[in-house]
Each structure stands twice: as C-alpha cells, then as structure tokens.
Image (cartoon, grey):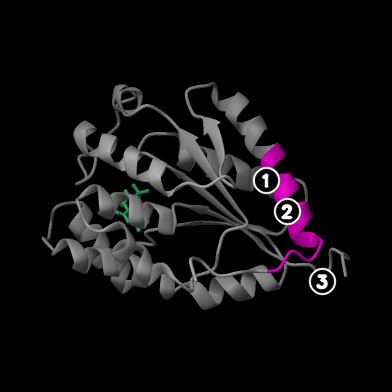
Amino acid sequence: SSDSSSSRGALIVLEGLDRCGKTTQSSNLHKYLEGLGHSAELWRFPDRTTSVGQMISSYLSNESQLDDRAIHLLFSANRWEKRSLMESKLKSGTTIIVDRYSYSGVAFSSAKGLDFEWCKAPEKGLLAPDLVVYLDIPPEKATERGGYGGERYEQLEFQKKVRQSYQALHDASWKIVDACGSVKDIEKQLQEIVLESIGLCQKEKPLTCLWS
Ligand code: 2DT
C-alpha cells in the first residue's frame, strides 16, 4: 500500500570528487529530512568503523600499501558487510543518505587503470540506489577550495582521471547538480530531488540490485 507507515525508505547516494561539498550536503539533507519527520539515516563509505574499514583508512592515509585490486575488493567488502543492515533499514521505512557508494569504488579504481568491468563485478548484487546525485565540480575548482587532507587520492591529476571515470559510469537516471553554486542553492535543489525520490519509493517502487 502507499500508506507511509508500511512503505519503504529510499536509498539516496551522493557522489562527486573530493571537496565537491558532498559531506556538507549529505549532512544538511539528513537534518532537513528529520525536520520534516522522516525516518532518515546518514551513512558513508568507506565506513571506517569496521575492521575492514580500518584497513582502508590506513591505506588512504598512506600508513599501509596494498595492491590496487586488493584495496578495490576491500572497499567492496566494506559495502557487502553493511548490505543486510541497509536492506532491513530500508524495508522498515528508513531513508538512507549515503556519502559515496559503488560508483566511487569503480571511478577511483578505474582511474588507476584497472579494467572497468572488473571493477564493477564485485558490486553486483549490492542494493541499487533509488537516486544518485552527482555534485559536479571541475577538479581545478575543487583543488582551489583547499582542505585536501593529504590522503592518497587528493591530487589534481588523479582527480581529473576520476572525473573521466564518473563520466563513463553515469547514466540518464543520475541527477547532475552544479557544485560550484552556493551551499543554499545546492541544498534547495537536493531537497526537491530527494523528496521526489522518497515519494516514488512510498508508492511501492521495488528495491533492486546493482548491475545484475
Ligand atoms: P572519503 O574522503 O569520502 O572518506 O573517501 N574511495 C571510496 C574508493 O577509492 N573506493 C570506494 O569504494 C569508496 C567508497 C574516494 C575516501 C576516499 O576513498 C575513495 C575517496
């Protein structure tokens, strides 16, 4: 039924380059939805709190080295270990806003030169987002914002390649939002897009899986 007490939540993913404003926007969106009385949670990948997440975190901060394929699979495992919780939350009516997901996995690893299809394979069977919002910013602009914390991928040349990978990955269902605008302006656009997506999920839009 479309009765909101029994309807599922939406899986909303925010993607984009480092310093595009994803984290600020995800958090503002979460507060906005809660303010409207929606049941909503804010997640992020990598989830650095798990033991797999700690291995990823140490790799990102250059404290450890890992083979490109090995780290790719750890990022994927980090999503798999959260999959069943994600499914039960969505089914119980909670909307989840996720700061990065499988698209980051494919975009960043393929930017290193790994085969695109090889990168997608371990993501197959994870839950498919109901909405992917890409916060679009030219890599040069993102660099100008500063605040790169010195993590492994935070370099202009690499971010340029990541942007190309995102371009190869996106499809017509993605909402592309210009991330160079004001925080308030972007926030308004996101609120509108996300409420529409939540509405569709309440009308029994089925939950599906990625890339299968
Ligand atoms: P944050 O700065 O957002 O914590 O991201 N990354 C992320 C990957 O290479 N593969 C993935 O599957 C995910 C989710 C993007 C840390 C960095 O990790 C990259 C930036």
- Of the residues shown, which amino acid type is indicated by label 2? Ile
Q: What residue is shown at x 87% (from left), y 64% (from top)? A: 2
User: Which residue in the structure is indicated by mark 1?
Assistant: 194
Q: Determine which quarter of the picture holds residue 177.
A: top right
Stretch of the chain drawn in magenta: 192-206
Q: Nearer the viewer, residue 2 or 82?
A: 2
Quadrant location, the N terminus: bottom right
Query: For disc 2, does the CB lie below 8 Å from ligand 1?
Result: no
- Of the residues shown, which amino acid type is indicated by label 3? Ser
User: Which residue in the structure is indicated by mark 2?
Assistant: 198
Residues at marks 3 and 2, CA–CA distance in whole angstroms: 13 Å
Q: Mark 3–mark 2 contact, CB under 8 Å?
A: no
User: Residue 197 location in percent, x, y?
Assistant: 71, 50
- Which element is circle 1 on? helix
Q: Determine which quarter of the picture holds residue 49.
A: bottom left
User: Residue 163 location in percent, x, y?
Assistant: 34, 38
